[in-house]
Image: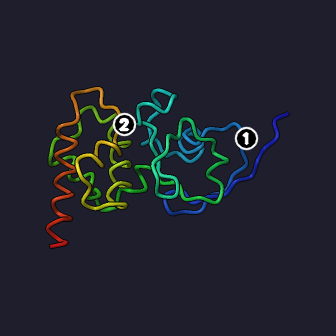
Amino acid sequence: MTQLVKIAFSLNGRPVETSIPPNTLLIDLVRDCFGFKGTKRSCDMEVCGACTMLLDGEPISSCTTLAVDADQCEVTTIEGVTPASGMSRVQEAFVVHGAIQCGFCTPGFVLAVTALLRRNPAPTDEEIRRYLRGNLCRCTGYAKIYEAIKSLASEANANAA
């Protein structure tokens, strides 16, 4: 008989509580138990970034993070950064700059960029590359993604001036 562990955390701004086997992965809990399917499972090795979620505002690979590690934390998925009325600024920039190809990797990129811009609204090229090093795009490349991020950074610089 598997022993269950009771955990409670905030998921996309709402408190949740559940009892799970201690080896449950965060991606499985969020997708299968709470129905947030925007996070994608891909490499299962913390390499591709498709499973990115924010844990207390920082990007993590939910395919290698135990759900028990989210106890008393704030977990944000792509659904959590998407306003009910449309898209976030990051999502809009991705659309405007054609940074969405097949869309499989996009939620992970959007969450990583959201975390980056919260930390630094006007990141340098090096900071952008460093923050996105854990996200892979298998469709075409990163030029459009960088354009989207740079446009947001330019807005931040203009607003700061």
Q: Secondary structure at mark 1?
A: loop
Residue visible at 44% across and 42% down in the picture: 52
SS label for mark 2: loop
Q: Is residue 81 left or right of residue 14?
A: left
Q: x%, y% of residue 42?
A: 45, 28
Q: Quadrant of residue 48?
A: top left
Q: Amino acid at mark 1?
A: Pro
- Which residue in the structure is indicated by mark 2? 135
Camera-side residue of 17 and 76: 76
Q: Residue at x 61, y 52 (%)?
A: 70
Please tell me which residue is depicted at 15% across the width and 59% down the height of the picture: 154
Q: Residues within 10 Å of mark 1 (few under 14, many from 20)?
A: some
Residues at marks 1 and 2, CA–CA distance in whole angstroms? 27 Å
Per the image, the residue denoted by label 1 is: 22
Q: How is this picture coloured?
A: rainbow
Q: In the picture shown, does residue 156 fall above or below 21?
A: below
